[in-house]
Image: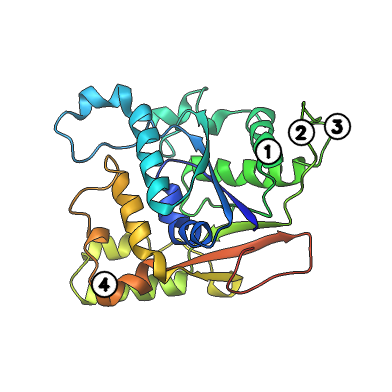
């Protein structure tokens, strides 16, 4: 049995970016752990008639949604780091000195180092330098995740605590969206009338060049796990969201494959279809 630690920015990112991957490895008997950096308190609220009343409780709601999401994926262990959601770039939440985006280096890196030493993962997943689509918390998650990967062995800045051992994950991965695959999928959906032109063009600039992708995980057997995981985040996804209504002929191709960049490898093993 091997282990994998997925470090994500918000509750729901574990599903959107890595859902079938986590479900696949959990089902295969590997140890799968999710660490969530922020409390999601700057998110939107859908599917409820009283969002103004719920906003003060949103962080609590989203933690419960995360737990339900992980149950749908078969993931039994998670760490809630609890930093304040930074909101989108340029919003008032992004200026809050308490938000994740404004944190100093040592506190969040130290927390993630403790998590790495606790679970001893063979591989760590975080985001690419752009954070997938430029959200400040995703960019910060990339920075903190990459720093902690190396800092876990730095006993000068991060000395061992009681019952801790030095642990260095063998591989560091960045979750990524292949521009080529993403646009091909979206073109299919647009041609079939499932998404609007606005939705089709919305994410045109984002994604990684296909040649930069190192690993494509085939999680087609776990598409329903991913869908149920996303549905658990009810405050974030409208009940009639198009992603829940993908025709069967597109579903596996659109949701069943997840891409990764191998950012660092301390060993000699690597695969184009497997992370651990």
Callouts 1 and 2 close, C-beta under 8 Å: yes
User: For numbered disc 1, what is the local secondary structure?
Assistant: helix
Query: Disc 3 marks which residue?
Result: 156
Instruction: Please give the label number shown on residue 118.
Output: 1
Q: Residue at x 52, y 42 (%)?
A: 77
Label 1 neighbour load within 10 Å: few <14, some 14-19, many 20+: some
Q: Residue at x 77, y 27 (%)?
A: 161
Q: Earlier in the sequence, mark 3 or mark 2?
A: 3
Callouts 4 and 3 close, C-beta under 8 Å: no
- Relative placement, left or right, of 238 versus 111 is left
Q: Residue at x 46, y 69 (%)?
A: 179
Can you say which quadrant of the picture contains the C terminus? bottom right
Callouts 3 and 1 close, C-beta under 8 Å: no
- What kind of colouring is applied to the model shown? rainbow
Query: Disc 4 marks which residue?
Result: 189
Measured as percent of width and height from the top left, residue 243 is found at 27, 60
Query: Disc 2 marks which residue?
Result: 164
Res 112 quadrant in image: top right
Q: Residue at x 42, y 36 (%)?
A: 90
- Relative placement, left or right, of 232 versus 18 is left
């Amino acid at each position: 049995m091997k282990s994998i630690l997925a470090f994500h920015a918000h509750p729901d990112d574990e599903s959107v970016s890595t859902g079938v991957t986590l479900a696949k490895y959990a089902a295969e008997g590997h140890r799968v752990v999710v660490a969530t950096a922020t409390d999601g308190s700057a998110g939107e609220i859908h599917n409820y008639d009283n969002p103004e009343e719920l906003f003060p409780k949103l962080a609590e709601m989203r933690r419960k949604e995360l737990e339900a999401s992980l149950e749908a994926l078969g993931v039994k262990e998670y760490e809630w780091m609890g930093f304040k959601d930074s909101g989108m770039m340029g919003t008032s939440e992004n200026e809050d000195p308490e938000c994740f985006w404004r944190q100093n280096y040592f506190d969040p890196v130290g927390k993630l180092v403790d998590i790495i030493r606790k679970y001893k993962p063979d591989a760590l997943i975080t985001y690419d330098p752009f954070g997938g689509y430029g959200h400040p918390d995703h960019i910060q998650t990339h920075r903190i995740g990459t720093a902690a990967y190396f800092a876990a062995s730095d006993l000068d800045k991060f000395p061992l605590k009681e019952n801790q051992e030095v642990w260095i994950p063998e591989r560091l991965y960045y979750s990524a969206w292949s521009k080529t695959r993403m646009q091909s999928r979206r073109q299919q959906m647009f041609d079939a009338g499932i998404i609007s032109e606005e939705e089709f063009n919305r994410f045109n600039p984002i994604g990684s060049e296909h040649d930069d992708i190192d690993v494509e995980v085939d999680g087609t057997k776990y598409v329903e796990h991913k869908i149920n995981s996303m549905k658990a985040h009810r405050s974030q996804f409208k009940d009639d969201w198009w992603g829940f209504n993908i025709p069967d002929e597109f579903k596996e191709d659109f949701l069943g494959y997840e891409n990764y960049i191998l950012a660092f490898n301390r060993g000699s093993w690597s695969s184009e279809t497997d992370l651990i």
